[in-house]
Amino acid sequence: MASVYLATQESLNRKVAIKVLRNTNEAQLNERFINEAHFIASLNNPHIITIYDISTLPGGDHYIAMEFVGGGDLDENRERFREPAPVLRLIREIAEGLAVVHAKGIIHRDVKPANILFREDGTAVLTDFGIAKDVDNNSDLTQAGFSLGSPSYSSPEQAQGQPLDITTDIYGLGVILLELLLGHNPFKGDSHTSTAINHIQLPLPELPAKYADLSPLLSRMLAKRPAARFQSCEELVSAIDLLAGERPAVTNGSPAGGFDIQRWLAGKPRVLLPVTGVISALLLLFALTYKTETDREVDRLLQQAELGMEEARYIFPEQDNARYYFRQVLLLDENNDEALDGLEQVTERLVQDYVARGAEALERGALNRPHENNALHFYREALALDTDNPQALAGIQSVVDEYTRRARASLLEGDLKTADRNVKRGLNIEPEDEALLALRAEINEKTPAAKRLIRDVFGKLREKIEDNG
């Protein structure tokens, strides 16, 4: 939507970046571009790009003059982020910037390495609000809604075109954190579609042992359900601060406020130190590793459930599938987050499977036959699990559209009987479809009354036979 130039502001003799909007004949695009500039200018945070000026060029093109950030983007600075400490500092800085954005009621929607720049002093800066979105508004802040963000960093709900809240930005930031720790993005597939499916289905990969203490943080940031994530960037910043404060305690003593074994031992006779040290170590080991019988059974069921997910045993065979094991966990621990997330994943994968099978059936022309192996059946199964699933709803409409196309083609060929059959099948799915109703009226005009009566009787008989297989 725009070009960016490096320029010099002569009055202050400083480098600036000029973002110039093209296609200025589109009034709506101009308005959104200016809205973006005004919005960014209203933000005051060292980790958000600074706007200097908003104006137009002599030719009429709108432009934004903004801070020139010369340190490159995150992809160009990866060597600086090989250890947990600088990585956590980076994530914290961007979270601070996002907190200010979210406080204004805006979702960035495109948090990715290319949109994280660095000043010469190493400060991280969030930029490019080109597809930002008002939390309480269905319209985009800038672009006309064509872009949904970068697939490699999109949340599961963003990948599916579902409603978004601010936690989608937290998810994107979590993908960046995971990528920096692993050295690669595990969600990135061979295509946009496979990448989106990975975000929806792929579980959080296991971290190397030296990053194990970061797993709880990543689990919250990358939860498949928005409600299971941090609900604000302030919460995320607090968690990072707590974690950053605890990491040194692993080797340098107890965390602040915890039981300080060294201080306790300081007042004891030296002869007791070896014994008390061993006892303390054993007590600590017991506290860290002890599990009740219920805990062990929950762990076993969760392992079976994950195995079922990996082998695509979502609901079959009976009592040996992922859904069964997750439900067994909830009988023992009704608030178990892993089981609750798992059940949602089972539903999501089943919906995606039904939608994919529906599309395949539609492509081969199996609209409502054979029985339980046709497009209409699969799309309805998806809607039974997710009543508002946009892909399944669109699939149902595609079936109706195909019946409309077939009816219109038969009508043009003078085959009123086949045309009428296709119209009826389409209206059985969508009784108020205007195109089909118009075709039915046209067919009735061309069909004599006697033939119409016979056609209706035999048509109903045929439909019953077909519906019964």
Image (cartoon, helix red, strand yellow):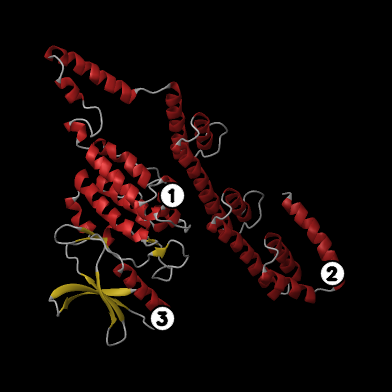
* Tag 2 secondary structure: helix
Query: Could you tell which of marks 1 and 2 lies nearer the N-terminus?
Result: 1
* Crowd tier of the residue under label 3, counting other residues whose Cα lies within 10 Å: few below 14, some 14–19, many 20 or above: few
The residue located at (16%, 73%) in the rendering is 15
Q: Position of residue 146 (x, y in %)?
A: 42, 68
- Residue, far front: 267
* Tag 1 secondary structure: helix
* Crowd tier of the residue under label 2, counting other residues whose Cα lies within 10 Å: few below 14, some 14–19, many 20 or above: few
Between tags 3 and 1, which lies in front? 1
- Say whether residue 366 is visible: yes
The residue under label 3 is: 26
Q: Which disc, if any, is residue 125? A: none
The residue under label 1 is: 226
The residue under label 2 is: 451
Between tags 1 and 2, which lies in front? 1
Cα separation, mark 2 vs mark 3, equals: 55 Å
